[in-house]
Amino acid sequence: MVKSMTSFGRASSRQESKHLFSVEMKSVNHRYLDVNVKMPKSMISLEEQIRKLINKSLSRGKVDVFINLKGNSEGNGVAKVNLDLAKSYLKCLMDIEESLGVRNDITINQIARYPEVIKVMEEEDSIEEIFKEIKPLIEESILMMEEMRKVEGEKLKEDILLKLSEIENLVEEISKIAEKVPMAYKIKLEERLKKLLDGIEIDESRIALEIAIIADKASVDEEITRLHSHIHQLRKTFEEDETIGRKLDFIIQEMNREANTIASKSSDVYMTNIVINIKNLIEKMREQVQNIE
């Protein structure tokens, strides 16, 4: 199955959940799997477990994970009293009463209203409970990403195979031209010699030797054979049930190498133009392969 590395996934807690989490994940192409997790500091100890979840499903790509805590469906705070502070407030009030000789109207309600005497403390949930809540959200986001990767991957595969067929046709054209190169060179050589020698008899064996040397130097039979082999390998690779991005990239590099060699040997303008078209198609394929997992 061909998979793209470009994808997006998201999931959120249901309203009846204890906490309202939202998880968003996005990925782009990368040589390896690079996971970056952003979440509340209180959950930082879960980062390794989150990474392991992602590693089980994805093998390549730069993955950004955003985990947000929107709030609680209902308050779980506990009121706590600071008795030492309350006693300190009471002593201060009594000192004022004694020093100024005013009537004592101190009440519990009055002291309780002073800052920090009574505070509402949020109950801390165990990190295990929090992970139980966010795990299915992460898995749901990964599933969405996987589906998107498959759809995009199939589109990339379809387009690459079309370009591959174009390259195959162009290679066949090069093969036909290459067969005629020695004869074309022979005709040109004879014409030049006739002009230079001006009626003097031409040594046919010498011409045959010269043509053989040029034909050997200009021969692209091996490069054409290897290009056909690479095209076949690339098609077979798409049928493999594993990550194929790196393998495809290597094959395309080898195709480009063969095309460069043919270009360096070519003495025919038409053949050179065909090679340029092949290299252009290979470059487009290379860009697309960079995004395949």
Image: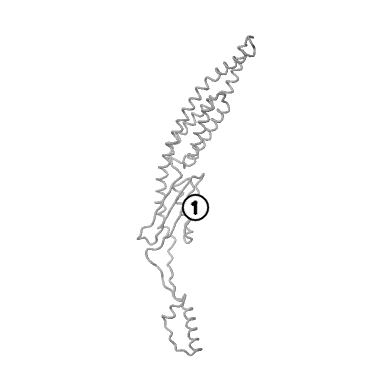
Q: Is 20 placed above or below 284 here?
A: below
Where residue 121 appears, x then y in whole percent? Answer: 44, 70
Q: Residue at x 50, y 89 (%)?
A: 100
Q: Residue at x 43, y 86 (%)?
A: 105
Whether residue 93 is visible to the viewer of this picture, yes or no, is: yes
Which residue bears the numbered disc 1? 36
- The quadrant where residue 181 appears: top right
Q: Nearer the viewer, residue 128 or 189?
A: 189
Q: Which residue reaches farthest left?
A: 16
**SS at mark 1 in the image:** strand
Q: Is 71 placed above or below 105 here?
A: above
Q: Is residue 286 left or right of residue 15?
A: right
Where residue 2 appears, x then y in whole percent? Answer: 43, 40
The amino acid pointed to by label 1 is: Asn
Q: Is 58 placed above or below 73 here?
A: above
Q: Nearer the viewer, residue 119 or 260?
A: 260
Where residue 203 appears, x then y in whole percent? Answer: 62, 11
Q: Residue at x 51, y 33 (%)?
A: 280
Q: Which residue reaches farthest bottom?
A: 101
Q: Nearer the viewer, residue 212 or 198?
A: 198
